Amino acid sequence: MDTIEAKSLFSPATGYIQRGGFQWTCNPYVGCTFGCKYCYAMYLPQNDQPKEDWGRWFRVKRNAVELAERHGRKVAGQAIYMSSVTDPYQPVERSLFLTRGILEALIPHQPRLVVQTRGPLVVRDIDLLNEFRSVRVNFSIPTDSESVRQAFEPKAPPLEKRWEAVATLRDAGIPFGICVTPTLPLEHPRKFAETLAASGAKVLVVQDFHHSGGGFGADTSKEAMSLVESLGWSTARYREFKNQLAGLTELFEGEAGFFPPPDSATAR
Ligand code: SF4
């Protein structure tokens, strides 16, 4: 396992995360073995590996918990986005407990916390999440189709497991959002919209998927793009889905949906 001694754990938020109102990002790992084929993180300077290898490597910040303990005070009461360029609940977290250790270290400082993940493992830490007065788990569920999920996120957890995790969070009273971002091709958009609207999510976010042709932004493999085309997915169909969902509940589009939870316990 590749480990590194990190200089810092909390980095000043930039880009859409900063614009959304976050002060800090927190990434326990470098790289991400979920390896989503459209992941923007592979285009960032932090990725010093070939883009083709995204998802096949990761590095562990072995001193992450120590840094959280040492620097937790500086993020007290401020908004943290965990994580911006990795998934804090990728498989290795099951045995390393870095994300869990960071949460434990942060509880005394009560930041306003968003945990962004595709990993059902997050439910392991419900006991700690419950200790935050201002928290939201943003779950990424970008499609209703397992075959689409497998084409774009072959190493990420199946959709059924994510919905089970969402139900567990809901039953435990942990505020959660659902990010349909990017919105991948859908099999049954109307039914998916109804499921999302009835989910109990505090925040729903959608975003049109587009192929950037190798530039920064949502991108994916030729095979996955062929699937998009074979399903007849298009911006027009995305808009139709978005309007269906908007007719049922409040929603946000794109970066407008990435903001911290309210800073009051009563808002939970
Ligand atoms: S889970 Fe997030 S960080 Fe990991 S590959 Fe997918 S989009 Fe990128």
Image (tube, grey):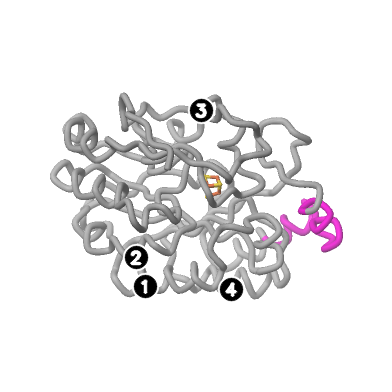
Tell whether 54 sits left or right of 125.
Answer: right
Marks 3/1: CA distance?
A: 33 Å
Residue topped by disc 3: 46
Magenta residues (range): 224-241
Query: Residue 103's spot in the image, x, y percent?
Result: 25, 49
- Mark 2 vs mark 3: in front: 3
Q: Residues within 10 Å of mark 1 (few under 14, many from 20)?
A: some
Pointer 1 or 4: first along the chain: 1
> How far apart are the two marked residues, 4 and 3, measured between alpha carbons?
38 Å
116, above or below 29, in the image: below
Determine which residue is flagged by label 1.
168
Q: Mark 1 touching mark 4, by CB under 8 A?
A: no
| Residue beneath disc 2 | 123
Instruction: Answer with mark 2 or mark 1, whichever residue precedes in sequence.
Output: 2
Magenta-colored stretch includes residue 237: yes
Q: Position of residue 160 (x, y in %)?
A: 54, 73
Q: Nearer the viewer, mark 3 or mark 1?
A: 3
Q: Where is residue 259, by image quadrant?
A: top left
Question: What is the number of the mark on residue 135?
Answer: none
Q: Earlier in the sequence, mark 2 or mark 3?
A: 3
Give the crowd class for mark 2: few <14, some 14-19, many >=20 residues within 10 Å: many
Disc nearest the viewer among 1 and 4: 1
Q: Main secondary structure of the magenta part?
A: helix
- Dot 2 or dot 4: first in sequence order is 2
- Please, what is the three-letter code of the amino acid marked with disc 2? Val
| Picture quarter with the C terminus | bottom left
